[in-house]
């Protein structure tokens, strides 16, 4: 679905991503775990071409080289970014925010339209004519996700969606991510919240100082608590490592 | 001052304010979206007046003048945006200011070269000359027409901005252009379209006031200073602010001319200073 090879990204003179390579298969939910400043947001922005890499390749479905495109062209290929800080428009209403994502997409019966979005997210239906600035953090996050699902989405990039949310809302968010995954949408979830990342995704990358330090499944990561402690200063906190069954 | 004189002054102020709105509205939208302080916006207003004069002169039709002037200026706006502004997006605002200041000088001198230093006027349609009775006051019919025409155009702009999907795109663009781009909108094309439409509205303003304010090579500079004051009073980038600012400036100018005789020109600066003292970011600032 998505393959990054040797991606180097800079902010002006500062070298942020130092040759990142990773891949996501169709329908997978993969997390990108790292501390603040590890390069998670930059990686998301590089995929979306908001901060285009200076070197390396980012290919979608092994067909399209994203580094040759503009952000709006990447969006039209079905790639959606839920940016850190939600990226919703506070002065617009909930409905206007949702409709904005449909402006550039052709109308199709199968697409998620505004009405279907309201069925899926009733809280948004109640607030449809309200300005977004009056919404809580959790509601904004739901709006950002709903907007990212409008039309035809094949790859969802979520940049720290749990940031600043109450634990109860984070659990709802985790369930929502699992539901989205079931619809066949591929998910790349950037998180500092290890528990959330481990419970929502099947595979994980740990990013440290712009480089991939670990790649493996949930079980492999829970068995290597030392990596989590070294890179993030935390343990997984979700499951004890289970020894592989004897063969 | 008697009641009828006060009504006349207020109507003058509202008319001036609504015309200013056509220029300042574009100025604030362009700034809000593209972060470009378009010093050449007054030149587009002036070009509208000169194109209008030429069309009226050649065809004898006032209505053709106010139709063709904005189309022609829209085309000029396209050339300016596409060839000069586009390569400078994302650069510090000073670059845009210098560029558009340069363009305003070029337009002003081109106008002097083509039309000379003479003062022109567009002849108003016969049925709009003379005066009409309003609230017991005899008021020039053409000024009333300009007031109503500008109000109608402002309502049209308001409908475009609030009721259409492209209006939502423009409002979103004034909030966060990058997020807009990341939602499938080719913001370069939106910039061009917005610049062209704002140029056309400024040109309509120039053409429609020509019969009452005359056409002269300094008019672009005069209006841009007023438009900047409007935008500063209202709040940079705020569309509502431009409406409020334009009406305040229009009324302050006219009431100042009556009540502060001898200090009329100072009136708008006093109002601006007073507002900025209490609201340094302008009257309408929509923060989160």
Image (cartoon, rainbow, N blue to C red):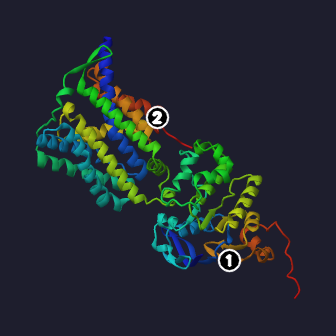
Classify 10 Å Cα crowding around label 1: few (below 14), some (14-19), many (20 and above).
some
The percent coordinates of residue A197 (x first, y second) are: 72, 66
The percent coordinates of residue A47 (x first, y second) are: 55, 70
Q: Which residue is mark 1?
A: A213
Furthest toward the right, the residue is A246
Q: Which sits in the foreground, B94 or A198? A: A198
- At 59% from the left and 44% from the top, the residue drawn is A133
Tell how many labels: 2
The percent coordinates of residue B252 (x first, y second) are: 35, 26
- At 81% from the left and 76% from the top, the residue drawn is A223
Q: In the image, is residue A206 above or below residue B25?
A: below
Helix, strand or loop at mark 1: strand
Q: Is residue B114 left or right of residue A108?
A: left
Q: Which sits in the foreground, B56 or A140? A: B56
- At 71% from the left and 59% from the top, the residue drawn is A176
Q: In the image, is residue B93 above or below residue A204?
A: above
Using the rendered image of the protein, determine whether residue A188 is visible from the camera's viewpoint: yes
Q: Quadrant of the C terminus of chain B?
A: top right
Q: Which residue is mark 2?
A: B283
Chain containing mark 2: B
Q: Is residue A195 left or right of residue B23?
A: right
Confirm whether circles 1 and 2 share one chain: no
Q: In the image, is residue B48 above or below residue B209?
A: below
């Amino acid at each position: 679905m998505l393959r990054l090879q040797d991606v180097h990204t800079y902010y002006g003179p500062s070298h942020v991503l130092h040759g990142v390579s990773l891949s996501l298969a169709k329908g997978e939910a993969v997390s990108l775990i790292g501390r603040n400043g590890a390069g998670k947001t930059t990686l998301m922005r590089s995929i979306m071409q908001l901060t285009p890499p200076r070197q390396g390749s980012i290919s979608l479905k092994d067909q399209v080289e994203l580094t040759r495109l503009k952000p709006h062209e990447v969006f039209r290929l079905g790639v959606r970014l839920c940016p850190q800080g939600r990226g919703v428009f506070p002065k617009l209403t909930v409905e206007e925010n949702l409709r904005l994502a449909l402006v550039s997409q052709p109308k199709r019966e199968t697409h998620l339209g505004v009405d279907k979005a309201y069925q899926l997210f009733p809280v948004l239906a109640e607030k449809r004519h309200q300005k977004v600035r009056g919404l809580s953090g959790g509601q904004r996050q739901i709006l950002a996700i709903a907007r990212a699902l409008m039309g035809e989405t094949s790859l969802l990039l979520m940049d720290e969606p749990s940031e600043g949310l109450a634990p109860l809302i984070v659990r709802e968010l985790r369930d929502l991510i699992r539901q989205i995954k079931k619809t066949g949408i591929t998910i790349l979830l950037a998180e500092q919240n290890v528990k959330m990342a481990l419970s929502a995704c099947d595979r994980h990358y740990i990013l440290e100082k712009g480089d991939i330090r670990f790649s493996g499944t949930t079980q492999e990561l829970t068995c290597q608590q030392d990596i989590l402690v070294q890179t993030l200063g935390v343990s997984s906190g979700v499951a004890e490592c289970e020894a592989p069954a004897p063969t | 001052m008697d009641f009828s004189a006060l009504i006349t002054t207020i109507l003058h102020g509202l008319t001036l304010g609504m015309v200013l709105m056509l220029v300042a509205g574009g100025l604030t939208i362009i700034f809000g979206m593209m972060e470009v302080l378009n010093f050449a916006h007054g030149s587009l207003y002036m070009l509208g007046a000169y194109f209008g004069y030429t069309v009226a002169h050649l065809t004898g039709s006032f209505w053709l003048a106010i139709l063709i002037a904005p189309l022609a200026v829209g085309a000029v706006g396209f050339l300016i945006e596409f060839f000069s502004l586009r390569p400078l997006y994302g650069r510090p605002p000073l670059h845009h200011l210098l560029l558009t200041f340069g363009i305003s000088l070029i337009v002003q001198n081109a106008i002097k070269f083509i039309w000379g230093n003479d003062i022109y006027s567009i002849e108003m349609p016969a049925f709009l000359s003379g005066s009409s009775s309003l609230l017991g006051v005899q008021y020039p019919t053409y000024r009333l027409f300009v007031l109503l025409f500008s109000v109608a155009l402002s309502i049209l702009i308001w409908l475009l901005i609030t009721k259409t999907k492209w209006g939502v795109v423009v409002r979103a663009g004034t909030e966060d252009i990058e997020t807009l781009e990341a939602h499938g909108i080719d913001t370069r094309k939106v910039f061009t379209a917005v610049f062209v439409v704002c140029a056309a509205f400024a040109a309509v303003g120039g053409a429609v006031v020509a019969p009452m304010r005359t056409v002269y090579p300094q008019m672009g500079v005069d209006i841009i200073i007023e438009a900047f004051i409007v935008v500063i009073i209202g709040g940079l980038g705020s569309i509502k602010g431009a409406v409020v600012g334009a009406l305040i400036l229009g009324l302050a100018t006219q009431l100042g001319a009556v009540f502060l005789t001898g200090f009329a020109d100072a009136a708008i600066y006093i109002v601006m200073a007073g507002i900025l003292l209490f609201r340094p970011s302008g009257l309408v600032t929509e923060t989160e």
